[in-house]
Image: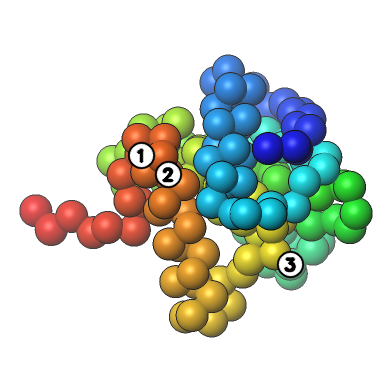
Amino acid sequence: MNASIDIAIQSEGWPESEDLIARAVAAVSDQFEDPRVGELSVVLSDDAQVQVLNRDYRGKDAPTNVLSFPQAGMLLGDIVLARETVAREAKDKSASFNAHFTHLLIHGWLHLQGFDHLTDETAEEMESIEIAALATLGIDNPYQVNDE
């Protein structure tokens, strides 16, 4: 995997993440014969900043878990995550913070690889790659519903 990863920590409370991010990116890249390579920026932020980005770039005035901003050429793009939303969703899903964080990194990395979930077909394709990449890291399928 030939992606250079720049990590910017813009809010407090994020766990040590360098190895986790590198492993998540590699897990996705390993799913492809010829993944896009180059420079990746991962921004570990908070709900307030992500809400501004979500409003300004997507017209949705609310925080979200992860945003991806693809670029051209050797600049692959940016993945921006909101710590409070990631933590809240992990708790709601009864998942560890790191497992959910990893899932969202993989999701964002797939967007930078050109995938989307605008149709059922593209969503299923993207989810299947996410599930396979997570499995290589020992993380359960996040889309599986547990009926208890």
**What's the amino acid at mark 1?**
Ile
Q: Secondary structure at mark 1?
A: loop
Residue 144, above or below 13:
below
Name the residue tied to disc 3: 58
Asked whether disc 2 touches disc 3, contact meaning CB atoms under 8 Å apart, the reply is no
Asked whether disc 1 touches disc 2, contact meaning CB atoms under 8 Å apart, the reply is yes
Q: How many angstroms separate mark 3 from mark 1 (CA)?
A: 30 Å
| Left or right of residue 51, residue 140 in this image | left
| Residue farthest along the left direction in this orientation | 148
Q: Of label 2 and label 3, which has the lower sequence position?
A: 3
Q: How far from the left and from the top, in percent, is residue 69?
A: 77, 55
Q: How many angstroms separate mark 2 from mark 3 (CA)?
A: 27 Å
Say which residue appears at 18% left-offset and 55% top-offset: 146
Q: Secondary structure at mark 2?
A: helix
Q: How far from the left and from the top, in percent, is residue 77?
A: 80, 49
Say which residue appears at 63% left-offset and 66% top-offset: 115
| Left or right of residue 39, residue 65 in this image | left
Say which residue appears at 9% left-offset and 53% top-offset: 148
Q: How far from the left and from the top, in percent, is residue 27?
A: 53, 41
Q: How many angstroms separate mark 1 from mark 2 (CA)?
A: 5 Å
**What's the amino acid at mark 2?**
Leu
Q: Which mark identifies residue 134? A: 2
Name the residue tied to disc 1: 139
Closer to viewer: mark 2 or mark 3: 2
Characterize the local packing of mark 1: few (<14), some (14-19) or many (20 or more) Cα atoms within 10 angstroms. some
Is residue 64 visible in the rendered image? The answer is no
| Left or right of residue 86, residue 112 in this image | right
Q: Which mark identifies residue 105? A: none
